[in-house]
Image (spheres, rainbow, N blue to C red):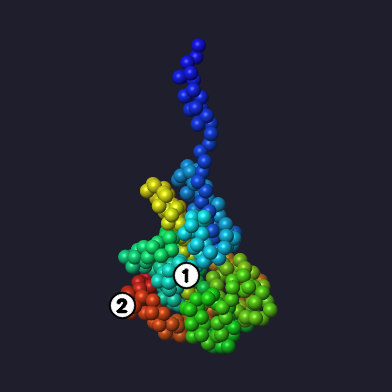
Amino acid sequence: MYSLKRVVPAVLAFMMAATPAISEAVRYSLWAKEGEAQYIAALTFKEVLEELSDGAFEVTIYPGNQLGTPKEMLEQLALNTTQIEASGDPGLVEIENLALPYLMNGIENYLAVLNSDIGKQWNEELIDTTGVRLIGILPRSPRQISANVPINSMADLEGLKIRVPERDYYVKSFLAFGAKPTPMAFAEVYSGLQTGVVDGQENPIETIWAMKFFEVQESVAMVDYIEKPAWVKISEMFWQSLSEEEKGWFIEAQRASEAKVNELLEAQQKELIAQLEAAGVLITYPDKALFREATEAVREELGIETWGEELYREIVAIGREAF
């Protein structure tokens, strides 16, 4: 006769081995659309995390702001209904204003600030006030200006209605350029350009292409007036539920996604400029020094207002470093 003491444990062991482990769902909200370098980077995040965790985490990516606006996403992260989000809104003005016009020479300068004691302190403040933690960035190409007329110099912007996001540094920058900044919801930009409610808009090249703004614009001026990454944030509630090893997996996946964007972005920008030209869009290269000079007062005013003069000068010095 078989002993139940031997059979039952053996059956249970077999059943446990035969039953696949249940993966923990990770929802990743992303502003970028399929095909953009940052979307491909999010796929890299998914691939690396799932491989490192041996399937313990399963990432689902929601591109194109499917899950809500950046403000709504911050609320979802705080509640842990969504775990990760990448957008242009970091959730803290001290971090946000690193995007002041011509303040940062490049993405490496952002990282230098964020990895400094200054950036670490801001992250603690972000966690305390929002329940959200910054774990990295997704680089974007510099922001350019498209319009329904050629922009060969700053003077060509005089009086043009340019759609801008509802942030003071965008509005003040275009006032400094001589344009008429017009805040408008992102979802309304294409129709606004098409109907002439606005004459132009500003965005990285990949966004101009992905949103098909080139269909209703004549030119794109390469002025690089803002170097601004997307901010990758994680629910602090979710983060605290992870073991130290699991946290390491998430950070490693994030670093891999940043590297993937850097690998793709420069080549993609050149390719998209060529495609824009093939579509009949005029690409111009105005003197950026004049744009930089025109926005000096914007940097000074908002920088000192945000950080105080001493810290502002320190950030300026980091922003100008060569990497």
- Depth check, front residue: 263 or 174: 174
Residue at image position (62%, 74%) is 189
Residue at the top extreme? 1
The residue at which mark 1 appears reads as 228
> Three-letter amino acid code at disc 2?
Glu
Name the image quarter holding residue 302. bottom left
Question: Is residue 85 in sight in this rendering?
Answer: no
Residue at image position (53%, 53%) is 27
SS under mark 2: helix
> Three-letter amino acid code at disc 1?
Lys
Residue at image position (44%, 76%) is 100
Q: Tell me if 28 is positioned left or right of 150 in this view.
A: left
Question: Is residue 200 in sight in this rendering?
Answer: yes
- Depth check, front residue: 140 or 275: 140
Q: Position of residue 138 (x, y in %)?
A: 48, 62
Residue at image position (46%, 44%) is 53
Residue at the right extreme? 195
Q: Return the disc, 1 or 2, that comes first in the chain's sequence.
A: 1
- Depth check, front residue: 93 or 194: 93
The residue at which mark 2 appears reads as 310
Q: Position of residue 152 (x, y in %)?
A: 56, 83
Q: Tell me if 109 is positioned left or right of 186 in this view.
A: left
Q: Is residue 126 above or below residue 226?
A: above
Q: CA distance from mark 1 to mark 2?
A: 23 Å
Name the image quarter holding residue 66. bottom right
The quarter of the image holding the C terminus is bottom left
Specify few, some or many for label 2: CA neighbours under 10 Å numbering under 14, 14-19, or 20 or more.
few
Q: Is residue 42 above or below residue 225?
A: above
- Depth check, front residue: 246 or 33: 246
Q: Position of residue 285 (x, y in %)?
A: 53, 79
SS under mark 1: loop
